[in-house]
Amino acid sequence: MAHEGGTKVNYGFYWSARAWDMAMIPAEGGLLPGGSDRHYSRIPTFLFLLMAPFMGALYVVFLPFVGFTMVAGYAARGVKRLATDAFMNVAVAVSPHWAPGEAYLAGRRKAKADRLAARKTAKPGRDGDE
């Protein structure tokens, strides 16, 4: 008989295959952990005594693989960050610096002022002083 998480049950050992979880309920009874998405089955004490060491052994065997996977994920994240930073630095260096309003307005006034200054220095007697 299956029980949902959060329901009141009698004393015993309850197993959730989906969550890979065992719950021990005390003699006075209690609530199963989790929400309605978890389903528990009551298992006999003898079966619990057989399953507990098996679950511990699987934990010990697969724990190094979990560690290697976490280290590989961390390394991959670092390589991704380095590649992204390198690509962005290259993109900034290669892209042209373009500021249309600043380049057009500031450059034209300066060029006009330079031309007027050049005309005045090139022909000093043309202002009516002759």
Image (cartoon, rainbow, N blue to C red):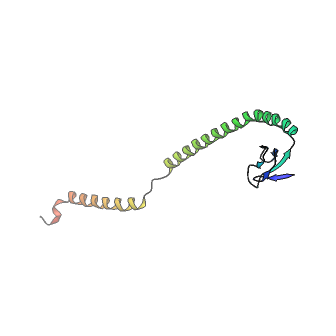
Position of residue 25 in the picture relative to residue 67 (left or right): right
57 or 90: nearer the viewer: 57
Left or right: 76 in relation to 97: right
User: Quadrant of the image for the C terminus?
Assistant: bottom left
Considering only vertical position in the picture, is 123 above or below 62?
below
Tell me which corner region of the image, top left, top right, bottom left or bottom right, holds residue 120.
Answer: bottom left
Residue 47, x across and y down, in percent: 87, 39
Quarter of the figure with residue 107 = bottom left
Say which residue appears at 21% left-offset and 57% top-offset: 121
| Residue 89, image x, y percentages | 51, 45
Position of residue 96 relative to residue 55, above or below, is below
Most extreme residue toward the left, as rendered? 130
Q: Position of residue 48 (x, y in %)?
A: 84, 39
Name, please, the residue furthest toward the bottom. Answer: 128
Q: Residue at x 76, y 48 (%)?
A: 30
Residue shown at the point (58%, 43%) measured from the top left:
81
Q: Nearer the viewer, residue 116 or 86?
A: 86
**Left or right: 77, with 17 as reference point:** left
Q: Is residue 95 left or right of residue 113?
A: right
Q: Position of residue 67 (x, y in %)?
A: 69, 35
Task: Name the foreground residue: 72 vs 39.
Answer: 39
Q: Residue at x 53, y 47 (%)?
A: 88
